Image (cartoon, grey):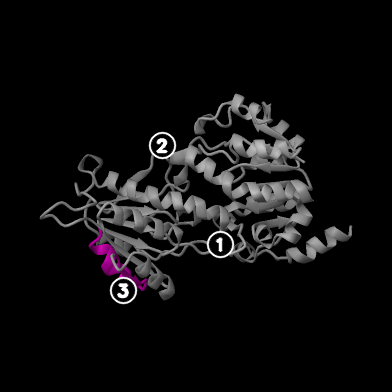
């Protein structure tokens, strides 16, 4: 099978869909891998590294797409990239269609490509296999970012996250007890912060209390409790995730107005629309803005800050699925691997994801029925 890795058009996206180690596994299995010239430089991978791994270096996205059965990248596709795709091709990337423009979905449908979203792929346990790795990285980064912007020279409160004798630690409030929230809580505890986690799932909160030996505080994520928690917080981390759907605004602008001056909000849900009403997407090059005296960090692709680590993590998570597609073809891979099929958003000109179809008022068609028809033909 021919597999192409596109260069990221977004200037601040530094991750690569596959590392040279992943490429080597695919080429050793007899697949052809095409990598766009200097695609890996922002993750400190040279063209020579990919060539040694068996890849062919290409010099235009058109060449990559025209020669590939499977096209991969990290960030969502641009309109010019979709225009170059052809019927029957498979496209894998982060898609985030629920917060995208209707025209992007319409283009994918008109091209009749199989569009698979990284953020929806599941493993055998039902976990979001690819997103989980990125969430673990984002959770760690959130505490580093919070500590950085609390510094007085960054406009923050001049507060240390941890404690020193006679001085209480900073208060870190985490909204969401999923992978981002759990990882952020672990790191925050490690530096000595006072940690509170809010979630609507009591079972998750109970698991966290056991995991951290009752060293954190937990609360149900009602409007009342969220309002009280963020009012006294030094760092608030929004880590709310609804699979494939837009995140709800659980922290309102009124709540933000009540926060302490120089406190920090890190909205890790911003790639799904954000869970803070005052959030808007920022970039790695210009990551923060101040509103109501509160510093907002709203970078949708936080793991790209540590591009090499994130690229290796992506490769570890994605490679088994790409191997399966390469060995069995896309139709058989989707039939035999329900977790991979959960990531499919468009197939043969139809929208196959219920949540996305609801957002844009599209008719949804069962992927299983489409696969059965493809198998017969």
Is residue 45 visible in the rendered image? The answer is yes
Give the side of residue 279 with respect to residue 67, left or right. Answer: left
x, y percent for residue 139: 40, 53
**Residue 341, numbered circle:** none
Which residue sits at x=35%, y=44%? 288
Residue that label 3 marks: 224
SS at mark 2 in the image = loop
Residue that label 1 marks: 127
User: How far apart are the two marked residues, 1 and 2, measured between alpha carbons?
Assistant: 31 Å
Q: Magenta stretch? A: 216-233
In magenta segment, residue 225: yes
User: How far apart are the two marked residues, 1 and 3, measured between alpha carbons?
Assistant: 30 Å
- The quadrant of the image that shows the N terminus is top right
Question: Which of marks 3 and 1 precedes in the sequence?
Answer: 1
Other residues around mark 1 within 10 Å, as few (<14) / some (14–19) / many (≥20): few
In magenta segment, residue 48: no
x, y percent for residue 289: 33, 46
Residue that label 2 marks: 285
SS at mark 1 in the image = loop
Question: Which of marks 2 and 1 precedes in the sequence?
Answer: 1
Give the side of residue 248 with respect to residue 317, left or right. Answer: left
User: How far apart are the two marked residues, 2 and 3, measured between alpha carbons?
Assistant: 35 Å
């Amino acid at each position: 099978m021919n597999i192409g890795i596109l260069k990221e058009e977004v200037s601040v996206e530094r991750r690569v869909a596959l590392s040279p180690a992943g490429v080597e596994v695919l080429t050793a299995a007899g697949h052809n891998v095409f990598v766009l010239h200097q695609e890996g430089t922002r993750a400190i991978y040279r063209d020579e590294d990919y060539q040694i791994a068996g890849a062919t270096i290409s010099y235009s996205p058109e060449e990559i797409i025209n020669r590939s059965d499977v096209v991969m990248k990290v960030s969502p596709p641009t309109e010019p990239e979709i225009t170059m795709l052809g019927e029957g091709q498979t496209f894998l990337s982060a898609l985030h269609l629920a917060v995208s423009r209707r025209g992007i979905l319409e283009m994918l449908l008109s091209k009749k490509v199989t569009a698979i979203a990284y953020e929806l792929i599941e493993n055998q346990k039902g976990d979001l296999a690819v997103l989980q790795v990125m969430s673990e990285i984002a959770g760690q980064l959130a505490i580093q970012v919070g500590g950085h912007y609390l510094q007085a020279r960054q406009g923050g409160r001049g507060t240390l996250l941890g404690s020193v004798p006679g001085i209480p630690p900073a208060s870190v409030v985490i909204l969401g007890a999923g992978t981002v929230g759990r990882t952020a809580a672990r790191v925050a505890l490690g530096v000595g912060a006072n940690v509170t986690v809010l979630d609507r799932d009591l079972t998750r909160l109970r698991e966290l209390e056991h995991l951290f030996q009752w060293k954190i505080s937990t609360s149900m994520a009602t409007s009342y409790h969220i309002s009280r928690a963020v009012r006294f917080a030094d760092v608030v981390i929004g880590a709310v995730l609804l699979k494939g759907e837009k995140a709800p605004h659980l922290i309102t602008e009124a709540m933000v107005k009540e926060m302490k001056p120089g406190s920090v909000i890190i909205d890790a849900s911003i790639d799904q629309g954000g869970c803070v009403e005052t959030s808007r997407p920022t970039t790695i090059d210009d990551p923060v803005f101040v509103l109501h005296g509160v510093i907002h960090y709203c970078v949708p692709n936080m793991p790209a800050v540590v591009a090499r680590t994130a690229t290796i993590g992506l490769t570890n998570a994605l490679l088994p699925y790409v191997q399966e597609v390469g060995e069995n073809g896309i139709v058989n891979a989707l039939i035999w691997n329900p977790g991979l099929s959960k990531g499919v958003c468009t197939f043969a000109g139809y929208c196959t994801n219920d949540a996305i179809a609801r957002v844009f008022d599209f008719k949804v068609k069962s992927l299983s029925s489409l696969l059965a028809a493809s198998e017969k033909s």
